[in-house]
Image (tube, rainbow, N blue to C red):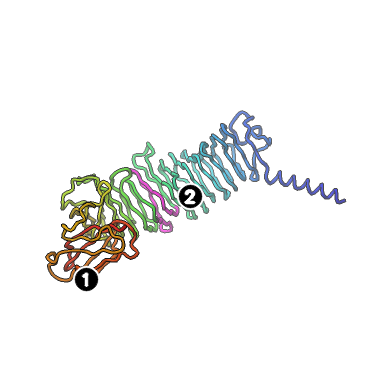
Amino acid sequence: MKTTTLILSWTLLFVYGVIQGQSHFWTGNGGDDNWFNTANWDAGTVPDASSTVFIQDGFNVEISDGPAAALDIELEGAVHFTISNDLTLSGDLIIPQISSVFFTSGVISGGGTIQNAGLFKLESFAMKEISNITINNNYEFLVELCNQILVKDGTVINNAEGATIDIASVGGFLNQGTSATLNNEGILRKIPDGTNPNGNFYLILDINNTGIMEVQENQTFLILGGNINLDNASPGIMRGEGFFDITANFTNTASIAPGTSGVGTLHFINNFMTSSASIIEIDIDSTTEGDYDRIEVTGSPNIEGFMLVNVNTNDLVIGDQFIILTAANGINSCALPTQVYSEYNGNIRYVFDIICESNAVILEYVFELLGNDDFDTNNEFYAYPNPVDDNTRFVFSSEMVTSGPVSLEIFNFLGQRVLQVAEISRTNTFERGDLPSGIYFAELKSDGKIIATTKIILN
């Protein structure tokens, strides 16, 4: 009796294992690439929702005749896998570096995960839907000449650092009022599709950007909807020469940088803002309009934070001005630093005033800093010793002071004020405290006006 029971138990376990976790190896013996041809599978059956599928190097496989299902699908080597109908995936679809998956139509759903280290490409104008799927993109995700793509019901797209999502298409990712999220740590880029002169692509899903969001010339990302969130967080960058059209809830604590590989004009339609932690990055190649970065806004922005300016010319003249931001409907508020220091050939050299007007932000070149070799007592205002280990003393002549008390302010490279001394004499000692090593700038003020500036280096 016990022996019979044991045999029956092992038999049931074997049958249960076959039913629940059968492996299917693609042989291609059917002579075609049809998923539904039983002769192509070693098991002699078509995979089902419990199957673990293995497709070996060198094969082409296509799901097209009807809906397919699998627990896991693992591509091995150079495989060309096409999904042209529905696929229910509850486990992992593993795409290695030299494999390609082409999604042309249908619905991918089932709660599974696409692990892409190769090419995952969406193509054709047929309807496509990704529902309750996680996509972990570690290499190349390409959308080419498609239409609207539904990404819904908890779908999450994770674009890893070093990976790329290129959108060469019109259309969009639409969540249809459900939840969907795109987490970008790599590059999310709107590029020309070669057909439409102006490429508009909707991103109707929540976006968390700590990588690069880029819109190339004549290209637009439309991030629309009051129930959609766009968070550009450090070290994220929004850059390019195209358009960001934003009506989503926009939070920006990171960088805005016009241009891609060079200078350019970056456009923001509707919502645009910078916060106290934001950085606006500006490159200047010459004084000619079009040879320096610019941001054009159609809304009424609130602007604060800091500015990073890189100068790529030595032809600046005191008084040169650069309109680096315009707002067609006026600037609502502007709380940028009054000055910014910039580099030329890797050395701190130029000082600009930041001027906030009613509908523009302007940089005005006001003076040139001394080089590192010029820290000596021949200057009217200097720090000694400099570079600074623990403390230093600021030296200036009494003839420099016209009236009122003399105050001192110290700024870091981004123009952030790190120290303010309301009243200073020629015998005051500056203690560095917890300030980290780096280059700083000291402004000497009399009667509220800057009378001298010097550079200090903290070791």
Count of numbered circles in the view: 2
Location of the C terminus by quadrant is bottom left
What is the x, y in percent for residue 91?
A: 59, 47
Report the residue at 85% width, 48% height from top: 4
* Magenta residues (range): 205-233
Q: Earlier in the sequence, mark 1 or mark 2?
A: 2
The residue pinned by badge 1 equals 423
Q: Is residue 226 visible?
A: yes
Do tag 1 and tag 2 residues touch (Cβ < 8 Å)? no
> Which of these two is toward me, 78 or 347?
347
The nearer-to-camera label among 1 and 2 is 1
> Which of these two is toward me, 277 or 73?
277
Q: Considering the numbered disc 1 on the image, is that residue within a helix, a strand or a loop? A: loop
The residue pinned by badge 2 equals 158
What is the x, y in percent for residue 135?
A: 51, 47
What residue type is disc 1 on?
A: Glu
What is the x, y in percent for residue 106?
A: 53, 42
Left or right of residue 356: residue 133: right
Report the residue at 37% width, 58% height from top: 253
What residue type is disc 2 on?
A: Asn
Left or right of residue 31: residue 137: left
> Which of these two is toward me, 222 or 283?
283
In three-dimensional space, the C-alpha distance between marks 1 and 2, rounded to whole angstroms, equals 53 Å
